[in-house]
Image (tube, rainbow, N blue to C red):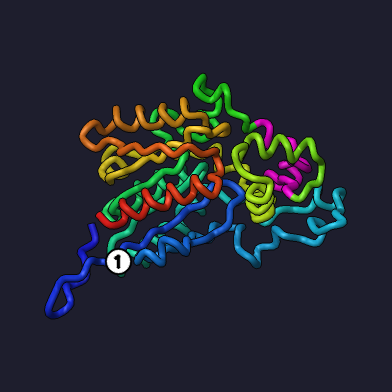
Amino acid sequence: MVAAPAAAAGGSRRAVTTIVIVTGANGSAAGDAELTLRGHRTVGVELPGHGPGDGQFRRSYQAPQDLAALATERSPMAGVTLDDYVEATVRVVRRAARLGPVLLWGGSMGGATLNRVANEVPRLIKRLVYSSAFCCVDLPSVADYLQTPEAAESMILELSGAGIGDPAVIGATRSNFRTSDPDVLAKLKQALCAGATDAEFLTMLNGMHPDESAQVPLADARGRKDTWGTVPRTYIRHTRDRVIPPALQDRFIAEADRLTPRNRFEVRSVPTSHAADTAGWAATVDIVDELARR
């Protein structure tokens, strides 16, 4: 663990925790204003291919869309791997650890990055927090877990309705999140955030990057007992999740606890969908705030 900064003269002062946030698939790097106002540092990891200058948001993606071009233009995500995500995140964790304790928090596919980062720098992380995130233990990859019985009710295939182009040509998976097709939008909302308002749903959807690495879901993302398994961890279950169903979330928890019975998941539950609605996010922030203060 990273030592806390020395106490100020005349009294003690709690070391400020830096909350490093790893987004899931198609997400953007972002901190959290509420957590910052509560006294923590928050920083989002800019994953390779997801930066503002990487070119995901191209002219063909604007309205009126050029769907023919969008279906064939090469992606800045081409060739990006989980190793690249891990390297970018480790850099942020190393810098943050110079300032004090680090809480590493990720959602959805971001859990694969959390596992691998904790394999690399376990002593720099005071706690791992998974928000309805993949936590590979017995099986190697995200894709492997989506083939399990616990994933049978997942609506992840519904997300393919927004897909466009051939990944072999583009070099990545591409989704047209700016589609106006009412059937596609209805399926996306049902899968991602069925309980949200239309305003919440469209705000979330229009902030998502269209391209994602085709290689990350296939990569070995298993946490190792002697590294990842030594870091305290919390799993925030999304009880209404239709992408990573609760049964699959529970499998992640059970496998991890079986691997490290002396370091089990602390489990919390939030009644929200895969992409948390406003109330679900507020409840999650309360949990993360409490964990960061320990």
In the picture as drawn, the residue positioned furthest to the top comes out as: 149
Q: Is residue 78 visible?
A: no
For residue 7, above or below residue 34: below
Percent position of residue 36, x then y: 41, 65
Examine the image and state in which quarter residue 161 appears: top right
| Identity, as a three-letter code, of the amino acid under mark 1 | Val
**Most foreground residue, 183 or 283:** 283
Quarter of the image with the N terminus in it: bottom left
Secondary structure at numbered mark 1 = loop
Percent position of residue 100, x then y: 28, 65
Q: Does the segment drawn in magenta span residue 165?
A: yes
Residue in the image at 73% along x and 37% along y: 186
Q: Which residues are magenta?
A: 157-177
**Most foreground residue, 72 or 245:** 245
For residue 9, above or below residue 269: below
Mark 1 residue crowding within 10 angstroms, few (<14) / some (14–19) / many (20+):
some
Residue in the image at 51% along x and 19% along y: 149
Residue in the image at 54% along x and 57% along y: 47
Q: Does the segment drawn in magenta span residue 193?
A: no
For residue 267, above or below residue 66: above
In the picture as drawn, the residue positioned furthest to the bottom comes out as: 9
Image check: 224 left or right of 211? left
Percent position of residue 98, x then y: 30, 68
Percent position of residue 289, x then y: 35, 55
Q: Is residue 36 visible?
A: yes
Quarter of the image with the C terminus in it: bottom left
Q: Which residue is mark 1?
A: 16
Residue in the image at 38% along x and 59% along y: 19
**Most foreground residue, 252 or 48:** 252
